[in-house]
């Protein structure tokens, strides 16, 4: 069993006084794949390194498999780590690099050979075992690094942006292979990335961090569909969610929101949620994802700006009042005529996909 | 066979290039030559001055030294082959000087490399007063030679501080520079002067070792000794080579201090090749001087070449 529990974990750098991680609380279940995601400097890698024992904990407790590991050496935590830049020993062959953890633990030679070859077969690098890392491509190097991590069959895998050094195509390919690998070795994974696509596709749960604080923990669908604050709403999703100043009107039986010169009636579910959150009439932040805006009459009045053709969609940039918005328009025909800059257009938000946030705290008035 | 194949390949490539480029007119060919000439001239304008400097101050003088080592005398420039070298090898003073120099370098250089590396490794750990220690070890570099001589005389003179201390344990006062311990005193002086700089070089090399490699070792349970010999030393090998060469050169330079401390003819165990060459220069025996200089240069070249080969083999995978 390899649950990982972090209780009130803090990281404060003594020299600078920087608070990198603040009161971090999380319970990771056995065999769960959890992804820490957030912008640079949000404390995700620091948290991972604290779990690994490579970074001292300033406060709080970390448990691996029910055992408190605050003062346990990294080698005794039964974890493996994959680094962004592969961290392969350049003077060792692929075989020796993969077998390194076993050699350090004095496994018999025959056992090392068996396990290394097994890992190499899983990662399809059997023919590379005699090569040195410099004779490998980026993708092959990362496979070797993963091989070194899986060969010992540890309780927990820690991965610190393992795909960030690869080009986009290879990253997609490796991502798929990680999903397959996870199914095959089925153990606890903690994965750090700044790439939301990786987070959404790999994680059972996603931990979104900002300035050392957890902003939301949830499944990919939860964080995408029910963001609890403007940070999560803006961070997850590409292009990012549109935010507009709006006026909420709460009635006795229904609610509506006035935005961009239009008044949009909210559905019953939203009304109940607003009531549960104690929302009152007044200024709010209206959020709608670009893919949930439709370009058709009877919606928010906007002035078209530039358009980007991405292939199957057209990203139409526009202005509503002074605010920039983007609408993702699905293209059905081969030749689509994007609206000319300055042309008045109308954007209709999908009613059930509307988000309402408190403009001061940024907290959602619908979820969380 | 492989040469023939490669020539064939070369020819084929040239033909393919010609095919792609199409016919070249004489005018175009002339323009190409002019362009290449311009390239050569512009690169010469950058490297030329340095090359002239090296030629005038190093290559030509060394050529003159080689010439002097092969003639009977400056007044009778008759070619004598290796006679001067053979005479030199038989010369007992030269033998003493060469032996002392070899013993000194063979002891002082490894000590300078190992001790400075140990100091750098110590300062690389989390110890208090790190920067103070660094300054302490670097301070000998800032002390002028005259002051160093004065300090060493105060310490190792017959009436010096060291004798005062050993007297506390019942030892008799000795003149350290005229005893069998003299080379030890000079080695101490050499180490005191050079450890700080070498240490800084090692510290910077240590800082350049990718931390992830050491972290993987930590996670996988490698011992500190394994980490040092299997990982750190690999990355330090170019610096070990550099520090070894630098220390070797500096070990010859210690003559200056020894000369100022003990004069032209020091105690037997302190008489080094530099003393020998200095004395040959004073007695205008340029042939012996030149032959000794050429032999020393050859030995240095061999040692440095061996060091380079070893480093090249040891550190080939971790560089670039």
Image (cartoon, rainbow, N blue to C red):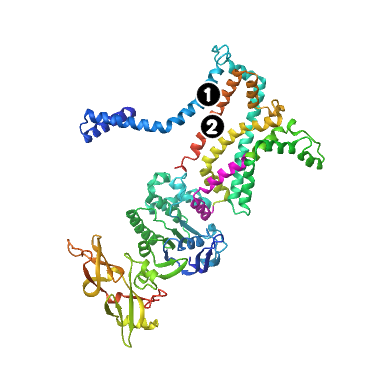
Are the residues under marks 1 and 2 on the same chain? yes
Which corner quadrant of the image does residue A42 belong to? bottom left
User: Which quarter of the rendered picture does the C terminus of chain A lie within?
Assistant: bottom left
Disc sitting over residue A92 in the figure:
none
Q: Nearer the viewer, mark 1 or mark 2?
A: 1
Residue A274, image x, y percentages: 36, 81
**Crowd around label 2: few <14 · some 14–19 · many ≥20 (10 Å):** some
- The answer to which of A40 and A368 lies nearer the viewer is A40
Residue A37 spot, x, y in % from top left: 41, 64
Question: Residue at position x 37%, y 53% from top?
Answer: A166
Secondary element at image label 1:
helix
Residue at left 45%, top 69%?
A: A214
**Which residue position holds label 2?**
B304
- The range drawn in magenta is B194-221
Instruction: Write down the residue under mark 1.
Output: B62
Crowding around mark 1 (Cα neighbors within 10 Å: few <14, some 14 to 19, many 20+) is some
In three-dimensional space, the C-alpha distance between marks 1 and 2, rounded to whole angstroms, equals 18 Å
Instruction: Tell me which chain the residue with mark 1 is part of.
Output: B
Residue A320 within the magenta-colored segment of the rendering: no
Q: Are marks 1 and 2 in contact (CB under 8 Å)?
A: no
Residue A130 vs residue A289, the one in the foreground: A289
Q: Is residue B59 above or below residue A216?
A: above
Q: Predominant secondary structure in magenta?
A: helix
């Amino acid at each position: 069993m390899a649950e990982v529990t972090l209780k009130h974990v803090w990281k404060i750098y003594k020299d600078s006084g920087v608070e990198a991680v603040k009161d971090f609380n999380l319970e990771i279940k056995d065999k769960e794949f959890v992804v820490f995601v957030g912008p640079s400097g949000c404390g995700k890698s620091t948290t991972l390194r604290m779990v690994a024992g490579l970074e001292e904990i300033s406060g709080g407790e970390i448990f691996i498999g029910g055992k408190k590991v605050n003062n346990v050496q990294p080698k005794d935590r039964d974890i493996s780590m994959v680094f962004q830049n592969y961290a392969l020993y350049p003077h060792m062959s692929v075989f020796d690099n993969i077998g390194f953890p076993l050699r350090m633990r004095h496994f018999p030679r025959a056992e090392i050979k068996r396990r290394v070859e097994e890992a190499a077969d899983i990662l399809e690098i059997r023919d590379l075992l005699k090569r040195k890392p410099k004779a490998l491509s980026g993708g092959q190097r990362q496979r070797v690094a993963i091989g070194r991590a899986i060969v010992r069959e540890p309780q927990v895998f820690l991965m610190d942006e393992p795909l960030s050094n690869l080009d986009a195509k290879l990253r997609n390919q490796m991502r798929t292979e990680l999903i397959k690998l996870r199914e095959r070795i089925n153990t606890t994974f903690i994965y750090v990335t700044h790439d939301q696509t990786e987070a959404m596709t790999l994680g059972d749960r996603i931990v979104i961090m900002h300035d050392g604080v957890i902003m939301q923990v949830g499944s990919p669908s939860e964080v995408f569909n029910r963001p609890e604050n403007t940070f999560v709403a803006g961070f997850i999703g590409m292009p990012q969610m549109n935010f507009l100043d709006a006026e909420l009107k709460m009635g006795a039986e229904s609610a509506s929101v006035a935005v961009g010169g239009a008044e949009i009636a909210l559905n019953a579910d939203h009304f109940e949620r607003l009531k549960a959150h104690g929302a009152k009439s007044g200024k709010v932040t209206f959020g709608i994802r670009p893919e949930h805006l439709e370009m058709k009459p009877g919606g928010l009045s906007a002035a078209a700006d530039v358009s980007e053709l991405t292939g199957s969609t057209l990203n139409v940039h526009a202005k509503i009042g002074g605010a920039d918005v983007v609408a993702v328009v699905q293209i059905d025909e081969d030749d689509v005529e994007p609206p000319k800059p300055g042309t008045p257009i109308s954007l209709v938000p999908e009613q059930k996909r509307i988000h309402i946030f408190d403009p001061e705290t940024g907290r959602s008035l619908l979820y969380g | 066979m492989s040469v023939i194949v490669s020539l064939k390949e070369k020819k084929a490539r040239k033909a393919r290039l010609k095919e792609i480029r199409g016919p070249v007119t004489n005018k175009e060919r002339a323009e190409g030559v002019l362009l290449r000439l311009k390239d050569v001239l512009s690169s010469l304008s950058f490297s030329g001055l340095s090359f002239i400097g090296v030629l005038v101050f190093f290559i030509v003088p060394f050529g003159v030294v080689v010439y002097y080592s092969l003639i009977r005398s400056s007044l009778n420039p008759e070619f004598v082959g290796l006679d001067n070298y053979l005479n030199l090898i038989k010369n007992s003073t030269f033998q003493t000087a060469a032996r002392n120099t070899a013993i000194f370098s063979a002891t002082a250089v490894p000590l300078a490399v190992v001790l400075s590396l140990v100091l750098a490794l110590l300062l690389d750990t989390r110890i208090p007063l790190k920067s103070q220690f660094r300054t302490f070890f670097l301070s000998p570099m800032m002390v002028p030679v005259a002051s160093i001589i004065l300090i060493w005389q105060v310490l190792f003179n017959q009436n010096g501080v060291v004798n005062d201390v050993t007297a506390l344990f019942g030892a008799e006062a000795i003149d350290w520079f005229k005893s069998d311990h003299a080379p030890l005193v000079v080695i101490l002086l050499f180490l005191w002067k050079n450890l700080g700089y070498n240490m800084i070089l090692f510290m910077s090399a240590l800082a350049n070792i990718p931390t992830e490699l050491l972290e993987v070792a930590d996670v996988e349970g490698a011992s500190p000794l394994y980490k040092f010999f299997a990982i750190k030393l690999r990355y330090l090998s170019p610096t070990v080579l550099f520090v070894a060469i630098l220390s070797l050169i500096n070990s010859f330079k210690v003559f200056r201090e020894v000369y100022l401390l003990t004069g032209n003819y020091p105690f037997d165990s302190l008489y080094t090749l530099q003393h020998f060459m200095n004395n040959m220069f004073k007695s205008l025996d340029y042939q012996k001087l030149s032959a000794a200089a050429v032999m020393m240069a050859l030995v240095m070249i061999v040692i440095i070449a061996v060091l380079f080969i070893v480093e090249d083999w040891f550190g080939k995978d971790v560089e670039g």
